[in-house]
Amino acid sequence: MRICEVFYSLQGEGTEQGRPTAFVRLAGCNLACGWCDTPSARDAAGGRDVAVDVLLDHLWRKKCRTICFTGGEPLLQIDEVVEACRRLSGMGYAVDIETNGTVDFRPVQPFASVCMDVKCPSSGEKSDLSLLPYIREKDSVKFVVGTNEDLAYVEKVLKHCPIKGEVFVSPVYGSDEKGIARWVLESGFPVRFQIQLHKYLEMK
């Protein structure tokens, strides 16, 4: 498993926002979002090779029962991630996967909850919307928005793609947060407005 870093922080977004979490940031990404905040994780050759056994031993020593696999795009290493999640779930850990919605996440769902980050126009990238029907009630979807075009895209997706899990609308850091909050209030869609907590606390 190619890993950039393992760190301990508060979960900054999603259904577990504010929860102490051990993060496993994997190396390699198949996208290049315009507002990416972890460009160092894009390179698949970055980081270091870590065996699943070694990673699990390290996480056990953290004494934290919530684990989040993030990236980059963690599901580019699907076999290793499924194995790690299967074993962590079997040991009673709560496991989350943050994915950009370009790789089929169904193999990991028996062992983890999934947060699919649907890419909006301002990112310069696209997610695979055909994956949205596989989002379960325990999973979630996140739209990171920064422009009116992004909000129009969120509206289009929500009208045409029913989503079972919770849906978050999160402003790009430094964008018009109040304007986006007003849109959430006025839209009538069953979504939650959410800022990226870790950015405001200046944490990872």
Image (cartoon, grey):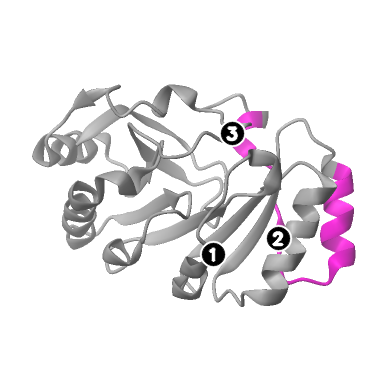
Count of numbered circles on the image: 3
Residue type beneath disc 3: His
- In front: mark 2 or mark 1? 1
Is residue 194 part of the magenta span, yes or no? yes
Residue at numbered disc 2:
192
Mark 2 residue type: Arg
Q: Nearer the viewer, mark 1 or mark 3?
A: 1
Q: Is residue 196 visible?
A: no
Q: Residues within 10 Å of mark 2 (few under 14, many from 20)?
A: some
Which secondary structure lies at badge 1? helix
Question: Left of 26 or right of it: where is 130?
Answer: right
Which one is nearer the viewer's eye here, 114 or 157?
157
Residue at mark 1 to residue at mark 3: CA–CA distance: 27 Å
Of the numbered discs 1 and 3, the one sitting upstream in the chain is 1
- The residue at which mark 1 appears reads as 129
Q: Residue at x 48, y 49 (%)?
A: 100
Q: Residue at x 23, y 32 (%)?
A: 2
